[in-house]
Image (spheres, grey):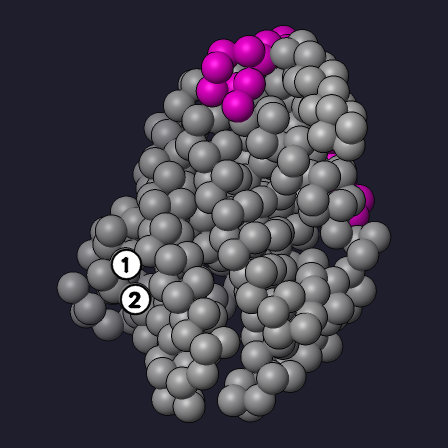
Amino acid sequence: MIYKVIRGALYKFSLELYMDFFRTLHTLLIIETPSEKIARFKVFYDAYLADEVIFEKEYEAHYFESPSYAGFCHVVEPLAVPKRRNMAQKKGQIILLHAITHIEYSAIDLALDHAYRFTDMPRDYYDDWLKVADDEIRHFLMLEGVLNELGSSYGEVDVHDALFEASQRTQTLLDRMAVVPRFLEASGLDATPEILIRLDRMPQTPFIAKIKAALEVIVEEEVDHVLKGDRWFSYACEQEGVDTSVYFEIIEKYYPRSFPRKKMINVKARQQAGFSCDELNIIASEKVC
């Protein structure tokens, strides 16, 4: 009986999805419950892949004042987020895992917002970012599962709004693709291997093994996400008639003095994600390739 009710609700929702693309994305972006957001996205994505959605003409995207997780996460300033210390203990593992889970949940909305905010784009653009949203959902569920096994759940540790704020500050395609995939997500390509190295130095427990396995999947697949950002950044540069070197001007505008990086950069992964040697040498302030 319960299954029939759920199936009926999803069918009714799918009929609504058949009517609109951007309005449905708006609904998905403001849904506060992760399970509901994910379930509705799955129906929507299936409909999209089956060409059962209609792109509205002259749709105007909304500016969001607060993120979808604001109702169940306690949001604090970035410096007030619990530090990832002593990961050999359960509490430290929970703090680490919760922080990464929050990044992946935020990344779901980031990908959806990429598709939602920019209308009249080639179909490939929407294919790319909905596929990324689907990947981020899988990453989130994978991490949430380990977090639950540790006796915690998403929303139990303080989080910050940095990724959400970046999405709402960047209202042009050029800025968005430079800032979110090519700067913030690309930074994850540098940070995740460092976390894996720290985890390798700890006593190897089943939970440490599960965290490492999840991170290895994520860092591998995030290369493709950054590469998609690189593709659409180049597209935006072409549309705007500017050289791709404008990337550094954009990052300086939003995140002053971010380059050169103070830490080692993941040269191989960044190259796979579309960064040129010229860019990497500037980012690192030395010849790295």
x then y, percent, for residue 66: 78, 48
- Quarter holding the C terminus? bottom left
Q: Residue at x 36, y 83 (%)?
A: 200
Verify whether residue 49 appears in magenta: yes
Q: Which mark is residue 269?
A: 1
Three-letter amino acid code of the residue under disc 1: Ala
Depth check, front residue: 143 or 164? 143
Q: Does residue 163 lie above or below 176 as drawn?
A: below
The reply to whether discs 1 and 2 touch (Cβ–Cβ < 8 Å) is: yes
Q: Which element carries disc 2, helix, strand or loop?
A: loop
x then y, percent, for residue 40: 66, 31
In this rendering, the count of numbered labels is 2
Magenta stretch, main secondary structure, is: loop
Q: Which mark is residue 223?
A: none
Three-letter amino acid code of the residue under disc 2: Asn
Verify whether residue 17 appears in magenta: no
State the extent of the magenta-drawn residues as a range. 46-66
Q: Residue furthest right?
A: 71
Q: Which residue lies furthest to the left in this view?
A: 289
Q: Which mark is residue 266?
A: 2
x then y, percent, for residue 121: 48, 20
Q: Which residue is drawn at 76% across and 38% down?
A: 30
